[in-house]
Amino acid sequence: MPPPLTGLRVLDLSRQLPGPFCSTLLADLGADVLLVTAPGDPFGVGIPFLARNKRSLILDLKCAAGREVFGRLVARADVLLEGFRPGVTARLGIDYPTLRARNPRLVYCSITGYGQDGPYRDRVGHDINYLAQAGVLEYIGEPGRPPVIPGVQIADLGGGALMALGGILAALLARERTGEGQHVDIAMLDGAFAWNAYQLLLAQLGQGPPARGTAQVTGGWPCYAVYETRDGRHLTIGAYEPHFWATLCRHFGREDLIAQQWAEGAARDEAFAFFRATFRQKTLAEWTAELAPLEICFAPVLTVAEALADPQLRHRGMVVEMAGQTMPGVPIKLSATPAEVRTPPPAPGEHTEQVLIELGFDAAAIAALRAAGAIGPPPQPGPENTARRRA
């Protein structure tokens, strides 16, 4: 069976990371995602592997002819995804109220830093700013040292892209019942704040606000920590549940530590000292081989290159080679209608003429649009495009 979103038409006007990541998941799930970019856009199709399974159209929304083409696209679209700052789409004449008048069934998703309203509405920002404002960055790092910037964009991807995906799918489901689309307003600050769920729970249970490097899941107890190995690599232990902690302690002949899992002060220092010294006695590879057969929550700290070669990720199809590029696979697994990586990233504007023909434009009309600067020039047949077409 085809992927579940086959036949769904998505217009993607977003840039940077959150919107393209969201639309990639929609495309992997079968949606016909059309990247709409302005002539001369320095981002082109953006991060190459986030343009897979998509088509590319170059269109100038600042000219009347370009807006007319866009209006035709909107009339037949199911979803529009944009990441402009609040107010920009209204100035361009492509805001939700305007487009809803043309297509009441349209699901219109906006991803911004702080949302469409509120006192921070017009602030600019990036992932680090949203994490800081949400209270997340404060407890990432070591005690007595500055907060550590995560290498993964938690607010962009978790707070933005994934929340947008959920919002879009929910709005599409609601449309099945009502026949009407709606505006999905996603703020990365909102999404990042929601990721505080566990720390807020601990605080409400009387453990106080999370402290950097000393809270339950930030490295403050030996049962949930990172340890250095003999070869200077690192190993993670996540023996949070009592039975996993007991198995870990018994494996090292320290049953006396079982009752000290959440001990503080000298008892906690003693347990930390033991495990730190113990894990420094063998290499990461040796510990991986020793602990793998046991019921112990552990994992080696891998480099990205090592993760690309990891047998579990390979088995799960999470490493895809296409058109000379290595990219992450599809993380959403469906048993009956699986998602798939079907086509390589397009060249900027590669599908402009194809899309215009679908909209009913003939060769003369397309030439007139090109002469007016409403669409981009034909993509050049360079080596990258040749390799892409062969793939």
Image (tube, rainbow, N blue to C red):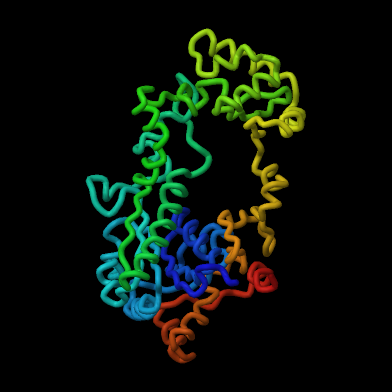
Viewer-closest of 261 and 349: 261
Residue drawn at point x = 44 percent, y = 88 percent: 361
Q: Residue 255's image quarter?
A: top right
Q: Please tell me whether residue 159 is drawn above or below residue 76 in the rendered image.
A: above
Considering every residue shown, the one lying at the far left of the view is 119
Residue 241 pos. (x, y %): 55, 28
Q: Please tell me whether residue 295 is drawn above or below residue 195 in the rendered image.
A: above
Q: Looking at the rendering, in which quadrant would you find the C terminus?
A: bottom right
Viewer-closest of 74 and 259: 259
Residue 47 pos. (x, y %): 54, 57
Q: Residue 198's image quarter?
A: top left
Residue drawn at point x = 47 percent, y = 75 percent: 376
Q: Please tell me whether residue 318 is drawn above or below residue 80 in the rendered image.
A: above
Residue 90 pos. (x, y %): 26, 65
Residue 72 pos. (x, y %): 37, 80
Give the total number of marks visible in the rendering.
0
Viewer-closest of 231 and 196: 196
Residue drawn at point x = 46 percent, y = 43 percent: 154
